[in-house]
Image (cartoon, rainbow, N blue to C red):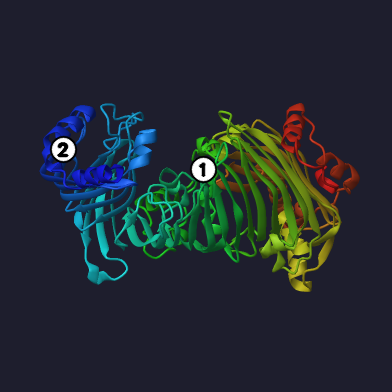
Amino acid sequence: MLLGLLLVLFLAVLFFPWDTLRGPLNHSVTEQTGRRFEITRRLDVHPGWRGVRVHLDGIEFANPAWARDPFLLKAERADFEVALWPLLLHRKLVLPNVTLASPQVGLQLEKDGRRTWALGKDTGDTGTVPTIGKVRVDAGTVDYLAPGQGLDLHAELSFDSMRGDLPLAYKVKGTYGREPVSAQGRAGDVLQIAAEGAPPFPFEIVAKGGQLTFKAVGTVSDLSTLDGLDARIDVRGLSLGNLYPIIGVVLPHTPPYALTGQLKRQGPLWQLDGLSGRLGLSDIAGDMRFETSGKRPLLSGALRSRTMDMDDLGPLLGMPPTERSAKAIEGVAAPASVEQVRKRQKGERARRVLPDAKLDFERLRAMDAEVAYTAEHVRNVRGVPLERGSLQLRLQAGVLTLDPLELGVAGGTIAGGVRIDGSMQPADIRASLNVRKLQINRMIPKVETLKTSFGRLDGRINLSGRGDSVATWLGAASGDVAAMTGRGQFSNLLLEYMGLDAGEVIKFWVRGDHNVTLRCAAVAFDVNQGAMDARTLVFDTTDTAFTATGQANLANETMSFVIRPEPKDKSILTARTPLLIRGSFGDPSVGVEATPLLARGAAALALGAINPLLALVATVETGPGEDADCGEVLAEARKPQSKNAQAGAAKAQAGRAPTAGVGK
């Protein structure tokens, strides 16, 4: 009896005239969603134990009145499966399989969170959003508008089984921000929107937007989250920093780049393995990770360059890349702004030297980071004998540290750390760097051509202050800057040129140059809110002692120094007089102090009127110079004197482990 009743019930369901419910169903869905829903031709239903298979011959489902496109979905036919138990137990709409014929889909996401695909009178976050597994289409269009994301896209789809494993082709055109974008590619015949346990479907894509080009070939398991992504990517563009609005990862501003690697995603973990390519003229390689499960996303990894070109460092400091760097990547044209900046700078004789572009500290608060970088060789150093470099970058809660930072310079090292607290406005910036054993002859190649053999240079930079660019930070910084060296060798010919001693120059031209002993040298400044006051400027040799006084101003980029030579030997034909270095950093001028020089000239003229040979008497140097107290000179250079400089230097060193030697 029971078996017979079940059989009758099964036959009734199987042969029920479902199309008679089309009108009531249209009315019910329209009422519940607040938008017109209509099955235009026929409704058919095939119930099962796990789900219900629904066939709609002709469907029109309108968008809310506020949307641009009239339809959320319009199609010639739609077949979909409704999972029964999630609907009955949890009132959750799950569509494991959807097949659409010639669909027109209109998706729109508003800034306030309203979505056209939220099925309810409230189309915000509380609206019912169906979970869709697999989607198969033969041809159609998809429009996506998201003003908050700056996206307005139109996609056209076509299906052809003759295309092998990638029968579904697509073309996308639209805008991102104000820039036109386009994409095209192919995919498998079934799109895995959110299908659990299904094999990943293959895809390929080539996308372009402005100067950005992105290519990828691989597979993905879940299109809605990109979970299970495994693709070979090739990306190139103007600056890695421009990717932040697109991918949400804070990357430094760089010159034009071209990178490849294997991109993967498993849950909250993104991986970029085998990264390789170029940033401008520099090569780059390594592996990166991006973890999104914590309080803040975490970027980690290790990068290295076999050769790093100095021309590529400008964007890191807020400056445009050089023309060489900007044009280094094929397919990425240098922006007009770079050319305009270069032309303007070329025409400005007294241009500012310190980078004044504002740094984007707000991005520092968007995520954390732990990245190591090593440059095995540095080229195109021009006047800076930089040979190699390495750093450990840490970013946590808006505080960026480059520590340890080590640079190989002129056979020695510059090592220390930089700390930028981007949680403050303006940012609190501290730099503590120690200089060790720099070979001075390698720092001044032109002197090396005079067969000069120098000693080694030690020193330090301890500066702290607040600013929103390199220029504003240095213009407000306080602390200590010092460099010093002990005994070494120095070219006597160059020394006499510096001292304006024509007699000695002629002698060395005839007899040949030779080196004199460098007893000691020190350059040290107290820095008080951007003003660099010289506390020690001494260069002492067995032939001449040079002392200097003056100041440099980092805020307005000006300087004024007086260098006084004090010879220790006797000579004729000398015009020794103080040297003056004045002007701006970008356009300095070097001259001599006129009064002593005019006095010697007047004396020579007066004596020459009596006897021409007596004119030489006025150019005789009796050599009153004395040896400097090198112990006192070096001791003075090691310690800032003003309270502001001492406080600034101590703040810069705070948090760093003490190091031995001159940097203490």
Query: For the residue labelled by badge 1, is the local secondary structure a helix, a strand or a loop?
Result: loop
Q: Disc 1 marks which residue?
A: 352
| Front position in the image: 639 or 514 | 639
Q: What residue type is labelled 1?
A: Arg
Residue 70, labelled with which disc?
2
| Number of other residues with Cα within 10 Å of mark 1, as a class: few under 14, some 14 to 19, many 20 or more | some
Q: Position of residue 16 (x, y in %)?
A: 16, 43
The Cα atoms of the two marked residues, 1 and 2, are separated by 56 Å
Q: Mark 2: few, some, or many residues within 10 Å (few <14, many ≥20)? A: some
Foreground label between 1 and 2:
2
Q: Which of marks 1 and 2 is nearer the N terminus?
A: 2
Nearer to the camera, 472 or 289: 289
Q: Position of residue 185 (x, y in %)?
A: 30, 62
| 266 up-or-down from 206: above or below | above
Looking at the image, residue 334 sits to the left or right of residue 393; the answer is: left
**Image point (20%, 58%), residue name:** 138
The N terminus, quarter of image:
top left
Q: Is mark 2 on a helix, strand or loop?
A: loop
